Amino acid sequence: FFSMAPFASAAARRPTPVPGKHAAGPADRSASARARAARSTTRIMSAKYIQVASHDVSGCAAWEKMVAGMVAAPEAEQPPHMALIKKFWCGKTSTQNNVSVCHCIEGKENLDKVQELFKPDSEFLKGFTQSPVMKDHTDSMKWNNFEVMVEYPKGESTWSGVEEGDILGVYSHGVPSAAEWAKIFENAVSADEGAMHKNSGIVKSFGGKMFDSEWKAAEGAEAVAVIHVFKSLDDKAKFDKMFDPTGDFFGGMIAAGGAFTPFYSLCSGPIFILDGK
């Protein structure tokens, strides 16, 4: 089977980050026209997915060296999932022994192949966990997946606007209808030329309906997930006060029946970025 062990001792090598670019409308458009244009570009028309995988490791530094070894290997020797994923957003979570990787995937066929590779009993995963970085940590692996239904702001590609050093806030909760929630979320992030982003220190957002995930919605609800991209941990901490289900904002949504507990969240970063194929 495929083994990750040869990559564990490779010298750390960071890829050069590719800054994202945000689309901007002509300066002479009216405010209402700009708002309509923004809304029309936030909805994702083709199938795109984000998988958020988190797991324990022997240490973040050793894990980064293992990842750098994967990238530096000749193409024929690279792990097979690298050819199926467009971007990898990688970073530690709350401790030095837990990491998170977001797989940015385009197309249902590629998603299915990645899920097959990472099935608990797959030969690939068995090889993956032979690395001393991963050894004895298989049971800690958690997966949360969602289809990207909304993106704001729109960039050169769906995945642009996320840069090395950014902080990712991953959030999830239940809603009555994921489709209706997507419309509300789309309007909220794009209203007033992105005022919510500017006021909350958010530079990019992705949202959509969850599937095959560790985080579950309450019975009768549908689970949705959001990734907000921040430039600093301080900006994320300020936003998290609003995400608190006991606070006024989300507390009011819960009381009105627009959101359901349990609420989940994960912090990843500062991230480094790998390009897939």
Image: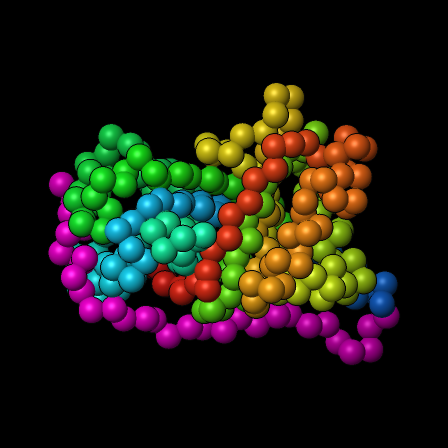
> Who's the residue at 42% across and 73% down the image?
17
| Residue 7 in magenta stretch | yes
Q: Position of residue 44 (x, y in %)?
A: 60, 50
Residue 245 placement (x, y as % from top left): 69, 40
Residue 222 image-quadrant placement: top right
Q: Main secondary structure of the magenta part?
A: loop
Q: Residue furthest bottom?
A: 27
How many numbered markers are drawn?
Answer: 0
Q: How are the residues colored?
A: rainbow
Residue sitting at x 36%, y 55%: 96
Report x, y in % for residue 55. 35, 44
- Residue at 18% x, 49% y: name it: 131
Q: Is residue 101 visible?
A: no
For residue 174, above or below residue 188: above
- Please state which of residues 273 and 28 is positioned toward the viewer in this rendering: 273
Quarter of the C terminus within the rendering: bottom left
Chain part drawn in magenta:
1-30
* Quadrant of the snapshot with the N terminus: top left
Front-most of residues 122 and 76 = 122
20 relative position to 28: left or right: left
> Does any portion of residue 272 appear in the rendered image?
yes
Vertical comparison of 242 with 274: above or below:
above
Residue 188 is left or right of residue 69, and the answer is: right
The answer to whether residue 253 is above or below residue 166 is above
Question: Residue 54 placed where, x, y %?
Answer: 39, 45
Query: With 254 as the anchor, is 9 left or right in this view?
Result: left
